[in-house]
Image (cartoon, helix red, strand yellow):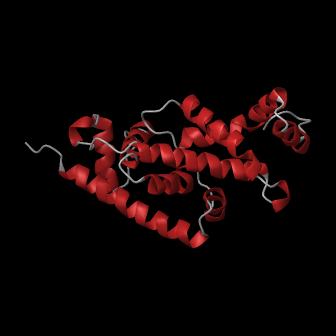
Amino acid sequence: MGTVNFDLGSCLQQVRQRDQDAARELVEHLYPLVIRIVRSHLPRRMAEEDLAQEVFVKLFRRLDQYQPHARVPLEHWVSRLAVRTCLDALRAERRRPELRWSDLSEDQAAWLEVMVSDAPAGPELTSAAAREVLERLLGQLPPPDRLVITLLDLEQLSVNEIAQRTGWSATRVKVRAFRARRKLRALAIRLEGTEPHE
């Protein structure tokens, strides 16, 4: 991440003194981390660059709150800020159109039937179809539930890594993941119930 000889302490000091070059260096250093988080939690109606820019605006506004001597690496502080910014953007998407069976392609409908029935998926079911349906179902969940499933199941972070990134306790991460998976399955079952029967 960032340049090889990047001196974070010196850069932060210069940024706090309103040095524009140092601010650009800091953005370049943190951009890969921020864009990865943004892409993982991007609301459907928002461009990733817009959301990343919002994260950096908040970062520079709140930089005085970061204490390098508090034994929290800047990257962890920025990760938490980015996750919260993404959650806020997801909450702003209050009106989510309900997903209907007729919105799904044949591959997506087949994958959903497999998911609900717990049957093993055949080779003809594409992972792209599965991913698309999962993304659409995740969009129906509240932002914290969507976040925990994305981090735990899609990005395969550990419970401790998620707790560190979100500021939640490990127990809260486990409980939220359990409840979120249950909600996701209920959404899939409800969606399958809207299948048009001939």
Is residue 118 something one can see in this rendering? Answer: no
Residue 135 in the image: above or below residue 143: above
Give whichever of 117, 40 is nearer the camera: 40
Residue 56 in the image: above or below residue 68: above
Number of disc labels? 0
Q: Quadrant of the N terminus?
A: top right
The percent coordinates of residue 195 (x first, y second) are 18, 45
Give the side of residue 103 with respect to residue 70, left or right: left
Give the side of residue 40 with respect to residue 129, left or right: right
Instruction: Residue 170: name its quadrant.
Output: bottom right
Give whichever of 117, 41 is nearer the camera: 41
The single residue placed furthest to the bottom in the displayed view is 171
Give whichever of 103, 58 is nearer the camera: 58
Is residue 109 something one can see in this rendering? Answer: yes
The percent coordinates of residue 149 (x first, y second) are 49, 55
Instruction: Residue 182: name its quadrant.
Output: bottom left
The single residue placed furthest to the top in the displayed view is 21
**Residue in view at x 37 percent, y 56 percent:** 184
The single residue placed furthest to the left in the displayed view is 198
Give the side of residue 153 with respect to residue 188, left or right: right
Q: Quadrant of the C terminus?
A: top left
**Residue in view at x 61 percent, y 43 percent:** 37
The percent coordinates of residue 181 (x first, y second) are 41, 61
The percent coordinates of residue 11 (x first, y second) are 87, 38
Instruction: Residue 72: name its quadrant.
Output: bottom right
